Image (cartoon, rainbow, N blue to C red):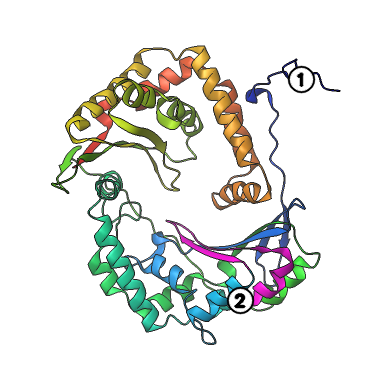
């Protein structure tokens, strides 16, 4: 019997030997790769189809996201309502997302309903009709949402800081507009779909409790034909064009009581050797609730309810972005405190107890992110789509466990100079 009077031994997260569960790979008859992580813990599964259909490939603004969204809103056989009713009937969920490089369709359903859901998914992926009335509804809804969001200082700040960092014509800095929504045409959307959502541009990631005849089923619905033909895509070379000026103040809401603060600078992409090191430094600085920024600006000064810094995971390039909303009268003081914390990390060694805490937090977060097949397949998807293998994952773990306080200080001296940052306040 367990003696409840004796506390269990506490084990630091950094002492765990983290292993990324491997995937199985299959290839459908037409060449589509399928990446599989099996689990029998729950009677559910997740199937994700990934295509190079992100905003990077569009020649007209919003075409990629609109094409991705409207594929689900009607086919040659069924209306948007009928498609959604068939999904809801089986308690399933079909989500779509469009990012900078890739676009996805993700199905979540009970394993026992997988066979019934595959024809619906096939129809959405292979036979969208892009009805004019659905585009009109989409255009109206998105313009209304944009009009509401443009009154919010944080929304405006997010749009502008990316534009300053990457350039207004770059996919990372390009934003939506009323004119861009008005310019959308069904013929343009259908043409974009036809070029990017093809069998040879498709990758499939699936995880969960899987049927025994999984590959046979996938072959039946996605692997027997060269659907939509063969399309060879060449990723266009696009240059980043950051703004020359670095300080911006925008007046957006004369009746508002808060302002949105953004302080950001460009940073190399995930392939740079400093990227995993910066993940540790960023966590200390503003990457979790116990960070330097939170302790100073939230806990001590009371300027904000929350302040965070993040490292973008974009493919071509990256950025460090510090963001918060603060009272109008303390926005400028908030920026000064941010710079103060940047300089402190440049001038002072991070104490060993703080570094140990951050190591445990980061390793613990990774352990949580690997809890279950759905999370594991997402980790593999990120690695595969970015052209790296499990060694990249293990190198990041090793960096978290072994990076020294002296290395972090040198990193801060390299990348935390206040003069290198763009600053934006929207009030």
**In the picture, which quadrant includes the N terminus?**
top right
Q: CA distance from mark 2 to mark 1?
A: 54 Å
Q: Is residue 398 left or right of residue 130?
A: right
- Residue 106 lies in the magenta stretch: yes
- Give whichever of discs 2 and 1 has the lower sequence position: 1
Write the residue at 49% across / 32% down. 273
Q: Is residue 121 left or right of residue 243?
A: right
The dot on residue 339 is: none
Asked which quadrant contains residue 339, the reply is: top left
Spot occupied by residue 35 in the image (x, y as percentages of width and height): 68, 57
Q: Residues within 10 Å of mark 1 (few under 14, many from 20)?
A: few
Whether residue 228 is visible here, answered yes or no, is: no
- Residue 288 lies in the magenta stretch: no
Spot occupied by residue 4 in the image (x, y as percentages of width and height): 76, 20
**In the picture, which quadrant includes the C terminus?**
top left
Which residue occupies the foreground of this view, 146 or 161? Answer: 146
Which residue occupies the foreground of this view, 371 or 339? Answer: 371
Whether residue 9 is visible here, answered yes or no, is: yes
User: Which region of the structure is painted magenta?
Assistant: 91-120
Write the residue at 43% across / 47% down. 314
The dot on residue 120 is: 2
Q: Residues within 10 Å of mark 2 (few under 14, many from 20)?
A: some
Write the residue at 39% across / 79% down. 134
Q: Is residue 88 left or right of residue 166?
A: right
Query: Going by the picture, which residue comes out furthest to the right?
Result: 1
Which residue occupies the foreground of this view, 89 or 34? Answer: 89
- Residue topped by disc 1: 4
């Amino acid at each position: 019997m367990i003696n409840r009077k004796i506390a269990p031994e506490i084990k630091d997260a950094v002492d765990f030997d983290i292993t990324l569960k491997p995937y199985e790979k299959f290839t459908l008859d037409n060449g589509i790769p399928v990446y599989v992580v099996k689990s029998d813990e729950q009677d559910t599964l997740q199937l994700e189809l990934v295509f190079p259909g992100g905003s990077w490939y569009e020649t007209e603004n919003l075409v990629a996201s609109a094409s991705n969204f409207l594929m689900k809103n009607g086919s040659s056989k069924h209306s948007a309502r009928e498609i959604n009713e068939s999904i809801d009937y089986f308690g399933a969920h079909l989500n779509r997302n469009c990012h900078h490089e890739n676009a996805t369709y993700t199905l979540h359903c009970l394993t026992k309903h997988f066979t019934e859901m595959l024809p619906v998914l096939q129809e959405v992926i292979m036979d969208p009709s892009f009805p004019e009335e659905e585009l009109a509804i989409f255009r109206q809804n998105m313009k209304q949402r944009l009009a509401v969001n443009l009154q919010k200082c944080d929304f405006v700040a997010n749009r502008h800081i990316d534009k300053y960092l990457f350039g207004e014509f770059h996919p990372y800095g390009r934003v939506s507009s009323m004119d861009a929504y008005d310019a959308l045409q069904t013929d343009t959307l259908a043409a974009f779909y036809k070029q990017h959502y093809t069998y040879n541009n498709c990758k499939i990631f699936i995880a969960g409790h899987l049927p025994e005849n999984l590959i046979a089923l996938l072959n039946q619905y996605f692997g027997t034909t060269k659907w939509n033909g063969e399309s060879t895509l060449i990723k266009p070379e696009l240059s980043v064009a950051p703004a020359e000026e670095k300080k911006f103040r925008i007046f957006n809401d004369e009746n508002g009581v808060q302002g949105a603060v953004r302080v950001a600078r460009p940073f190399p992409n995930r392939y740079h050797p400093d990227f995993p090191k910066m993940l540790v430094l960023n966590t200390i600085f503003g990457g979790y609730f116990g960070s330097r920024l939170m302790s100073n600006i939230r806990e001590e000064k009371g300027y904000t309810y929350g302040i965070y810094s993040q490292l973008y995971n974009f493919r071509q390039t990256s950025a460090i972005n510090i963001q918060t909303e603060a009272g109008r009268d303390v926005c400028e003081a908030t920026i000064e405190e941010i710079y103060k914390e940047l300089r402190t990390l440049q001038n002072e060694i991070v104490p060993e107890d703080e570094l140990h805490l951050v190591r445990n937090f980061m390793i613990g977060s990774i352990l949580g992110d690997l809890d279950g097949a759905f999370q594991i397949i997402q980790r593999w998807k990120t690695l595969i789509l970015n052209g790296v293998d499990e060694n990249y994952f293990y190198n990041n773990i090793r960096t978290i466990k072994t990076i020294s306080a002296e290395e972090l200080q040198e990193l801060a001296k390299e990348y935390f100079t206040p003069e290198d940052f763009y600053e934006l306040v929207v009030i």
